[in-house]
Amino acid sequence: MYAWTEEELAFRDAVRSFVDKEIRPLQDDLEHEGLPPYEISRKFYKAFGLDEAAAEYFEWQIRRDEAAAAGEAFDEPQPEGGVGGGPIANIELAKVGLGIPTAIGISAGMVGGTINSLGTVEQRRRWARDVMTLAKIGAWAITEPDAGSDAFGGMRTTAKPDGNGGWVINGQKTFISNGPYADTIIVYCKLDDGSEPDRRKQPVLIFVLDADMEGLTRSKPFKKMGMSSSPPGSSSSTTSRSALTGCWPASPAPTAVSRRGRTSSANASASPRSPSASSRSANGSPSTMPSSASCGASRSASSS
């Protein structure tokens, strides 16, 4: 039988005390009055130094990867890191507000993890660090009104080359956790370059979009039967263009929260840090997509 250590129990008690003092009095506001969970999530991060720990771990990763790219030895010990204080914190937070660990997990884990796994150093510094420390909030946009469990096959949101080295993204996403309040949005869409007439077989690409990009519209938070402390929404795009982001081919199962170098994605080699690797589509076949390194320097329409 597994038992918590004394240190873990002390941490649990400290989180429990924080929850009782800072979150429990706001429980009704979070669940029934539309109070977003982000400021209290940031307060939790700061109270336990999780924002500084996430930043330290991020910078360690950058130094490690820069050393590897330069062929240099790297022997710095790995600092402690993680998302949201781990399962002990999640157990205590979930007792009074499921939206708080959800908001943290999507922003720091899924969004930050995706960018940190696939992006260049420049892209990671631009987006990943802030969402991993909760300085900014990230959202994950893959579900669509007509594409839920069959997300890749039924996907209708498209990214189309505009002929000038940029992209036009059109479509609608829904049930986007953190969507109405996010600063940074991960968007999945189909490559529409005319090479594959069967929409279900079109390669899937991943874009990173800033929430204030021209052409991106977002809904107010949805009203739900429960767990209202995690506010989802929908978003749609127009054909207007604005400066982009990062763009990568999507593997069959992009693992957003995996540790770098240990991702289960079958196509991890096609990330921007391997520009010589051939881009592959979501079904594993070679893609007509330019290398993902060049995507990061292109232009795109707003989308989600």
Image: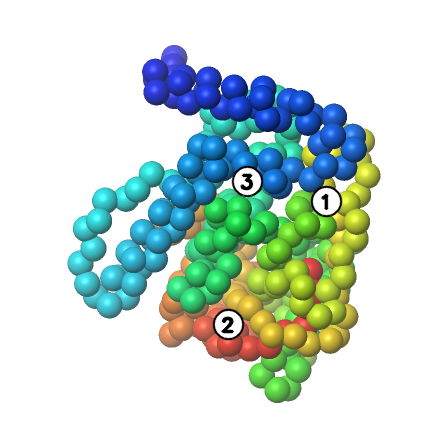
Q: CA distance from mark 1 to mark 2?
A: 28 Å
The residue shown at (64%, 22%) is 24
The residue shown at (40%, 18%) is 10
Can residue 157 be seen at all in this image of the molecule? yes
* Number of numbered discs visible in the structure rendering: 3
Residue type beneath disc 3: Arg
Instruction: Point out which mark residue 232 bears.
Output: 1
Give the label, 2 or 3, closer to the camera. 3
Binning the other alpha carbons within 10 Å of mark 2 as few (below 14), some (14 to 19) or many (20 upward) gives: many
Residue type beneath disc 1: Pro
**Which residue is under mark 3?**
42
Instruction: Point out which mark residue 304 bears.
Output: none
Q: Position of residue 43 (x, y in %)?
A: 54, 36
Image marks 2 and 3: residues in contact by CB distance under 8 Å: no
146 relative position to 107: left or right: right
**Which residue is under mark 2?**
296
The residue shown at (19%, 63%) is 72
Q: Is residue 125 above or below residue 43?
A: below
**Residue 229 or 38: which is nearer the viewer?**
38
Q: CA distance from mark 1 to mark 3?
A: 19 Å
Q: Position of residue 18 (x, y in %)?
A: 53, 24
Image marks 1 and 3: residues in contact by CB distance under 8 Å: no
Residue type beneath disc 2: Gly
